[in-house]
Amino acid sequence: MAQHCPPSGGSFNIGDAAAASGVSAKMIRHYESIGLIGAARRTEAGYRVYAEQDVRVLQFIHRGRALGFSLDQIRDLLALWQDKERASADVRALARTHIDELNRKIAEMEAMRRTLEALAASCHGDARSDCPILDDLAAH
């Protein structure tokens, strides 16, 4: 990702913060509404203003989402990131739990793929109306 430089004064409007972090303006507002990020400072006109540290937090969230962490997990990771007295074992435990979840989801998806491959292989794929794929869907 290219580094986005803030406008003069080191502050970002929501569009600049979105461009610099990879998080859409809509999601920035959502993260603020659920307390994942702190409320933005406001100009006299009511526009949101973000500091460089706010953008770093948004980048952290963006990367966490890209790795598949839930918002609750990201909330925990943010707390750990901001706690300089944290134990790295706590961070590792959270990551290991997430890896276990990913492995479970991968196994489920592989089972779905195998089932669909078997159903697709048993389907004639011609003008006949009988279809094992539809039969299987209707049976469950």
Image (cartoon, rainbow, N blue to C red):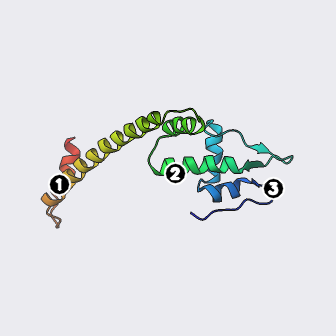
Query: Residue at (77%, 55%) from the top-left corner?
Result: 10
Q: Is residue 98 above or below residue 118?
A: above
Q: Earlier in the sequence, mark 3 or mark 1?
A: 3
| Residue 9, disc | 3
What residue does disc 1 label?
A: 119
Q: Residue furthest bottom?
A: 126
Quadrant of residue 15 within the rendered picture: bottom right
Query: Residue at (66%, 62%) from the top-left corner?
Result: 4
**Can residue 118 be seen in the rendering of this structure?**
yes
Q: Nearer the viewer, mark 3 or mark 1?
A: 3
Mark 2: give few (<14), some (14-19) or many (20+) Cα within 10 Å. some
- Image coords of residue 110 (percent x, y): 24, 50
Distance Cα–Cα, label 3 vs label 1: 61 Å
Name the amino acid type tagged 3.
Gly
Name the amino acid type tagged 1.
Leu
Q: Is residue 85 above or below residue 17?
A: above
| Residue 63, disc | 2
Name the amino acid type tagged 2.
Arg
- Image coords of residue 8 (percent x, y): 80, 60
Quadrant of residue 93 within the rendered picture: top left
